[in-house]
Amino acid sequence: MEFQNNLTYARQLDAEDNLAHFRNEFHLIKDKIYLCGNSLGLQPKAARAAVEQEFSDWEKFGVEAHFDGKNPWFYYHQFLTEKTAHLVGARPVEVVVMNNLTTNLHLLMVSFYRPTKSRFKIIMEGGAFPSDQYAMETQVRFHGLNPEETIIELLPREGEHTLRTEDILATIAKHGESLALVMMGGVNYYTGQAFDMERLAAAAHAVGAYAGFDLAHAAGNLDLQLHDWNIDFACWCSYKYLNSGPGGTSGVFIHERNATDITLPRFGGWWGHEESTRFKMLKGFKPTPSAEGWQLSNAQVFPMAIHNASLEIFERAGMHRLRAKSEKLTGYLEFLLQEGNNKNDFEIITPNNKVDRGCQLSLLFKDNGKQIFEKLLRYNILADWREPNVLRMSPVPLYNTFEEMWLTAQAMSQ
Ligand SMILES: *Cc1c(COP(=O)(O)O)cnc(C)c1O
């Protein structure tokens, strides 16, 4: 794609953008260019009314809103199922919205990490998001194993910043029959690298291991096809690219072959029990034969109301179309940054090939990164600083514009 570095051209790209109107569906931060959608997405205007609907049913019906409310709470999680399935390329039976991300990661490990004497290792990214590191470390200790001997951390080659698929595949093959699980991010939070989930899952399966993904930075960012890619399980939070508010609820994917297997070990709760007898309060846990069979508790209606309002926007925009715009928007920012007069102060460590990244660009600075981040703040541009020296910028196709990319690059160059 041939881009041009001028404001008229940037505005022309916005004028040609058939998704541009979605920007009006969000509360933009006054006078700011918001590039932190990877951290906390902006508020959909529809979120407030969605929550107020539930306040109003609670006020009017009390407990009876579970069945008599406009959106009966007994079934509330199910109102999100179809949209979630579309979002991540899954069948409805494979997804459920519940809890929070790290909680779900642990619940899924209960089913998919059952180490034996000979098969116990976990492969993960070196420097994974801390919550994932702590979850893996404590799961391993819970089984009485030593994390040092159990968790294999993938590291980039000397002088490189991201992982090569061939190296990940070689590591999987090397550990072979001792490998229980490949547990990776879909997109790395620090470098912005997207992984070839389909190939990694196939390689894990070839040695008899499971493949699971933390999609915190991939859901609502990449055009995921979890069912077809044959992923075993995945989970993600809803407050980053999915714009569902701080501490928002989480999504879970469990491949059909596992989701319908009610013999798979798990931790149970009444909401995972089969729906028809749930309120009979009988002894003996009978899981629902779907991802819903991993639920513990009744639906968190308020965070789910927000999430449902947000998913409705994704449903209309379509992940396929959003991804096409996203590639162009991020490509434009990358082009402009490389034309800037301080382009030698940093290196973009996010892969430059669009299949190997989502919307985020990570700029690694030699020394003056923090000053550049503060300068952007003075120009009312909100990016994200990660110690010790990385500036992350995430243009979001639902609400960022090509003009904002141009203004950001101008500010960088000042
Ligand atoms: C954001 C993020 C989390 C946060 O976990 P919560 O349980 O939602 O607090 C965990 N893992 C990754 C990879 C993340 O990007």
Image (cartoon, helix red, strand yellow):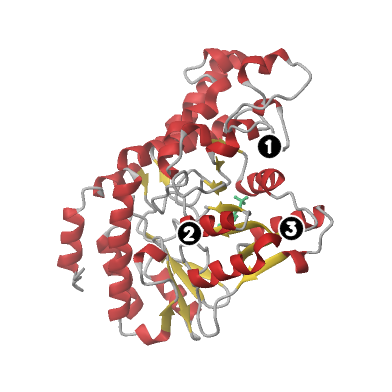
The answer to whether one can see residue 410 in this image is no
Provide the secondary structure element on which disc 1 rests.
loop
- Residue 372 lies in quadrant: bottom left
Residue 343 shows in the view:
yes
- Numbered disc total: 3
Q: Earlier in the sequence, mark 1 or mark 3?
A: 3
Secondary structure state at the residue bearing disc 3: loop
Residue at image location 60% in from the left, 28% down from the top: 289
Q: Amino acid at mark 2?
A: Arg
User: Which circle's residue, 3 or 2, is located before the other in the chain?
Assistant: 3
Which kind of residue does numbered mark 3 sit on? Phe
Whole-number angstrom distance, CA of label 2 to CA of label 1: 25 Å
Cα distance in 3D space between marks 3 and 2: 21 Å
Which residue shows up at 74% across the image and 25% down it? 285
Residue 335: horizontal and vertical position, in percent? 28, 73
Q: Secondary structure at mark 2?
A: helix
Q: Nearer the viewer, residue 155 or 23?
A: 155
